[in-house]
Image (tube, grey):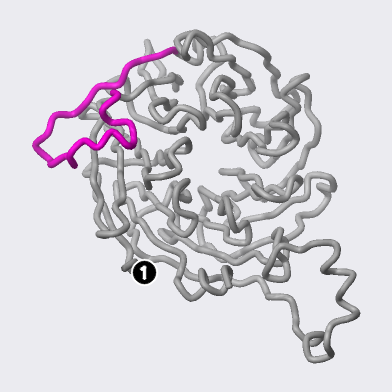
């Protein structure tokens, strides 16, 4: 029996990096990276048993430094990338590397759940994604579909396309481009679009959002002053190819049609502090999650700009039949955009929110104090969407 009550897990370390295990579509699994200056950093593998509403965890040691960003291979359940701080001479550099977890921790290996006394496991380094010649790495994004061989890294003002070869043991630079002009030319985040045969990437630097074509590594669109302050995060609508969501330090979440970037299609102003994270639901793109320094997670129903604006997938045939509907159906207004729920389980800045890749109704949020909360879409809404 599933329950709408949240499940809370404390990492005992500060943390800001969260990702679902993208290649795993059977088990509910999230990876969380810690930020500790005193102790060895760790990646916590969080397996959620939704039948019994309990969390099983395993710990991987990440001794190279504090984790700022984590992303999982879309093709290989055992492979992930981290961006981490490495103190060097006088300054701290953020590096990126690709790792493999031990075989026995891959999903479906049916190890017994760990208790706290069990030993931590070690990660196998596959390759580095930088020679630090390009500066500090803000994030790593995998090509969403495909064999997990292509990744983008954003390092200071450079966007770098890597080809992972020899079972990911070697990263070959396949293309690059750089920001030019004045202002703060430093990338903060980027997402790889699942559309256009995976040839487009969106990036954020300062208040600007840019689109890039990965074949030519050239800019295809530019949204200047997309937000009044720094843009923190981006996400593509998985079902509408030109739609992109952004969020930032102006407390706003904006939705863009990249064919016409003069104005956002829609703006949400529900948070009272910086918005760090925005994510579309993979199956039902009207469901949008946001996390903020106001310690809240907000689930919004952006149905008017979704692929199902009338509550179900719209077909051209459906629209032409509207005239023939019975009169009492005509008065039905399309559903309105609304906040579905505000989640208050965190007491610190929520740096990351993400949907499970195995259960479309389940999501996780992570606050800086190391609290991970697993929540579900309210059951009434779930049945309303499905029925």
x, y percentage for residue 231? Answer: 61, 44
Q: Is residue 317 above or below residue 109?
A: below
- Magenta residues, start to end: 102-127
Residue shown at 50% from the left, 57% from the top: 273
Label 1 packing within 10 angstroms: few (<14), some (14-19), many (20+):
few
- Numbered marks: total: 1
Q: Is residue 297 left or right of residue 147?
A: left
Q: Is residue 172 above or below residue 54?
A: above
The N terminus lies in which quarter of the figure? Answer: bottom left
Residue shown at 44% from the left, 12% from the top: 127
Q: Nearer the viewer, residue 339 or 168?
A: 168
Residue 119 counted in the magenta span: yes
Q: Nearer the viewer, residue 230 or 35?
A: 35
Q: Quadrant of residue 72?
A: top left
Residue 95, can we see it? yes
The C terminus lies in which quarter of the figure? Answer: bottom right
Residue 265 counted in the magenta span: no
x, y percentage for residue 319? Answer: 85, 69
Residue 82, can we see it? no
Residue shown at 82% from the left, 85% from the top: 330
Q: Quadrant of residue 311?
A: bottom right
Q: Is residue 311 above or below residue 175?
A: below
Q: Is residue 236 left or right of residue 109?
A: right
Instruction: Report the residue marked by disc 1.
Output: 4
Considering the whole magenta stretch, tell me its main secondary structure: loop
x, y percentage for residue 166? Answer: 49, 8
Residue shown at 12% from the left, 40% from the top: 116
């Amino acid at each position: 029996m599933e329950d709408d009550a949240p499940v809370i897990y404390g990492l005992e370390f500060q943390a800001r990096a969260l990702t679902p295990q993208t290649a795993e579509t059977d088990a509910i699994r999230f990876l969380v990276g810690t930020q500790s200056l005193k102790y060895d950093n760790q990646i916590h593998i969080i397996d959620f048993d939704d039948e019994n509403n309990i969390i099983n965890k395993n710990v991987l040691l990440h001794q190279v430094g504090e984790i700022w960003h984590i992303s999982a291979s879309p093709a290989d359940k055992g492979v992930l990338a981290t961006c981490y701080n490495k103190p060097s001479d006088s300054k701290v550099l953020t590096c990126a590397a690709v790792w493999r977890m031990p075989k026995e921790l891959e999903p479906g290996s049916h190890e017994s759940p760990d208790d706290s006394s069990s030993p931590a496991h070690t990660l196998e380094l596959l390759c580095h994604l930088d020679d630090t010649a390009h500066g500090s790495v803000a994030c790593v994004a995998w090509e969403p579909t495909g064999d997990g061989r292509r990744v983008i890294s954003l390092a200071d003002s450079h966007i770098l396309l890597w080809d992972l070869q020899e079972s990911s043991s070697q990263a070959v630079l396949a293309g690059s481009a750089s920001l030019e002009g004045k202002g703060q030319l430093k990338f903060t985040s980027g997402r790889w679009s699942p559309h256009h045969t995976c040839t487009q990437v969106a990036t954020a630097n300062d208040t600007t959002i840019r689109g890039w074509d990965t074949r030519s590594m050239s800019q295809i669109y530019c949204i200047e002053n997309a937000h009044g302050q720094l843009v923190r995060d981006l996400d593509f609508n998985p079902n509408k190819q030109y739609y992109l969501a952004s969020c930032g330090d102006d407390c706003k979440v904006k939705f863009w049609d990249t064919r016409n970037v003069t104005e956002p299609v829609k703006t949400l102003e529900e948070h009272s502090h910086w918005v760090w994270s925005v994510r579309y639901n993979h199956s039902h793109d009207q469901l949008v999650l946001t996390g903020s320094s106001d310690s809240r997670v907000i689930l919004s129903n952006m149905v008017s700009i979704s692929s199902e604006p009338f509550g179900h997938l719209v077909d051209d045939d459906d629209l032409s039949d509207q005239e023939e509907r019975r009169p009492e159906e005509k008065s039905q207004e399309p559903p309105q955009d609304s906040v579905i729920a505000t989640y208050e389980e965190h007491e610190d800045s929520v740096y990351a929110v993400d949907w499970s890749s195995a259960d479309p109704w389940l999501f996780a949020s992570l606050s800086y104090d190391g609290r991970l909360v697993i929540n579900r879409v309210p059951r009434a809404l779930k049945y309303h969407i499905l029925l």
